[in-house]
Amino acid sequence: MSDLRVLCLHGYHGSGAILRDQMESLATSLPANIELVYVDAPSRATGDFGWWHEGFDGWERTRDWAIELVCGGPRFDGIFGFSQGAALTGLLTAVKESGSAPPEFRFDFAVMVGGFTSDQPRHTEMMQHKLTTPSVHVIGRSDVIIPRKDSLRLADRFANPLIIEHPGGHIVPGHDGVAGPIAHFLATRKGSGQ
């Protein structure tokens, strides 16, 4: 049985299967007792490919879907997101901490790779205070899709973020310089869930 169960959220134009491929190198570097659960955005069933579109159109649908998913099945200990999925991870953390979701909407940590934050008033209102959920932020110094400064702004929404930088671009790196700190972070989370 897994010590940790992690919900994995893909990027824009992605899917659960694509994220599994993107995370392969990282996943093989993590302890075997971590279950990574890859899902597709709810809109993929209708031929769409994102968690939302320009102006965060579709955000509410995705938020409600994620709350139902997390509340309705076996517990997720944490959420991992890449790119738009990382932005979603940050927003779901804010929803959890704002008290606007059911009490069953719980997870203990968040890992965001190549993420960004929202400046929409409806989102910044939830992030007036620093988020206290333990978090990891992986940032590519050569990322031209999500510039470093945008990922740092997301990390700044958290009270005590672990920031891991790498020389690459918009990828999920799996080398020791990234995988080692993430594995250590996850090891400190084992058994922390209720």
Image: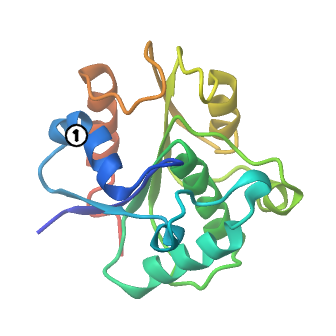
In the image, 184 versus 35, the foreground residue is 35
User: Circle 1 sits in a helix, a strand or a loop, which is it?
Assistant: helix
Q: How is the image coloured?
A: rainbow
Position of 93 with respect to 4 (left or right) is: right
Q: Residue at x 58, y 60 (%)?
A: 51
Report x, y in % for residue 183: 26, 39
**Image quadrant where one finds the N terminus:** bottom left
Residue 13 drawn above or below residue 91:
above
Position of 77 with respect to 84 (left or right) is: left
Report x, y in % for residue 35: 22, 60
Q: Residue at x 59, y 20 (%)?
A: 144
Which quadrant of the figure has residue 172?
top left
Residue 135 drawn above or below residue 74:
above
Q: Residue at x 65, y 66 (%)?
A: 97
At label 1, the amino acid type is Glu
Report x, y in % for residue 98: 71, 69
Position of 92 with respect to 136 (left or right) is: right
- Number of marks drawn: 1
- Which residue is labeled 1 in the image? 24
Task: Single out the residue that lies furthest toward the right.
Answer: 121
Residue 34 drawn above or below residue 172:
below
Q: Residues within 10 Å of mark 1 (few under 14, many from 20)?
A: some
Please indicate, yes or no, whether residue 164 appears anywhere in the rendered image: yes
Q: Residue at x 44, y 12 (%)?
A: 167
In the image, 173 versus 101, the foreground residue is 173
